[in-house]
Image (tube, helix red, strand yellow):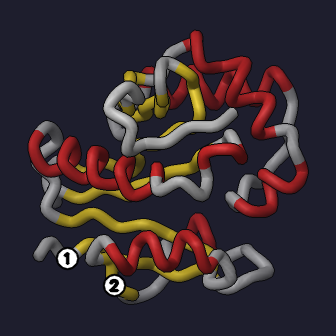
Amino acid sequence: MKLNINNPNNNILLEPISKDHLHKTYEWIIDPAFRKEFMVRGNVSWENHKSYFHNLIHDPSKQGYAVLLDHLHVGNCGFKHIDNLDQSAELWLYLGSIEVRSIGLGGHVLGMLLKRGVNDLRLKDIYVHVAENNKLAMNLYRKNNFVEYGDLSEEWKDRNLKILRMHWRPS
């Protein structure tokens, strides 16, 4: 697959996640290399995956989006732990299709997601957790005004690697 995100014929869309995205996401989730890179934990089974998707779609503290490039499902992103009172949420993003990981798509998707968080969800505090050894992700977040901040959420404390919490500081 040869894609160029700067080609005006290529369209990048964030589509609300739905059951239509279940199978492609499962293909990514069962890949051990993907699981390690994106810190996926827990038992991977079709039933668990369906349950996770059901929760993502129906839990009001979560917003999930499929990343589409030229109508191809190439990744997922969204917000979790949305707190309307504090106007805060944790951002998450992954590109499942290896072919699109080095063409600059992540930066475009991150920008679209941040805009959605601020404009649609009225978020003022957006943060992300990233493995310190994931240099590509660290560079992406730093380039987009994320800075290291504070302690980890309880959700990440049981890991065998260093996880950094980064907060977005709009310029």
Tell me the distance, in whole angstroms, between the alpha carbons under discs 2 and 1.
Answer: 7 Å
Q: Earlier in the sequence, mark 2 or mark 1?
A: 2
Which quadrant holds the N terminus?
A: top right
Which label sits on residue 47? none
The residue where tag 2 is placed is 147
Task: Answer above or below: position of 121 versus 136.
Answer: above
Q: Is residue 38 left or right of residue 13?
A: right
Q: Is residue 25 left or right of residue 168?
A: right
Say what amino acid the circle numbered 2 marks: Val
Q: Position of residue 80 (x, y in %)?
A: 41, 47
Q: Residues within 10 Å of mark 1 (few under 14, many from 20)?
A: few
Say what amino acid the circle numbered 1 marks: Arg
Q: Position of residue 162 (x, y in %)?
A: 66, 85
Q: Are marks 2 and 1 in contact (CB under 8 Å)?
A: yes
Question: Residue at the spot x=66%, y=19% of the render?
Answer: 22
Question: Residue at the spot x=77%, y=39% of the render?
Answer: 29
Question: Residue at the spot x=21%, y=66% of the render?
Answer: 125
Task: Answer above or below: position of 158 versus 64.
Answer: below
Question: Residue at the spot x=42%, y=31% of the render?
Answer: 65
Q: Residues within 10 Å of mark 2 (few under 14, many from 20)?
A: some
Q: Position of residue 69 (x, y in %)?
A: 48, 30
Q: Nearer the viewer, residue 92 or 12?
A: 12
The residue where tag 1 is placed is 169
Q: Is residue 169 left or right of residue 46?
A: left
User: For numbered disc 1, what is the local secondary structure?
Assistant: loop
Which quadrant holds the C terminus?
A: bottom left
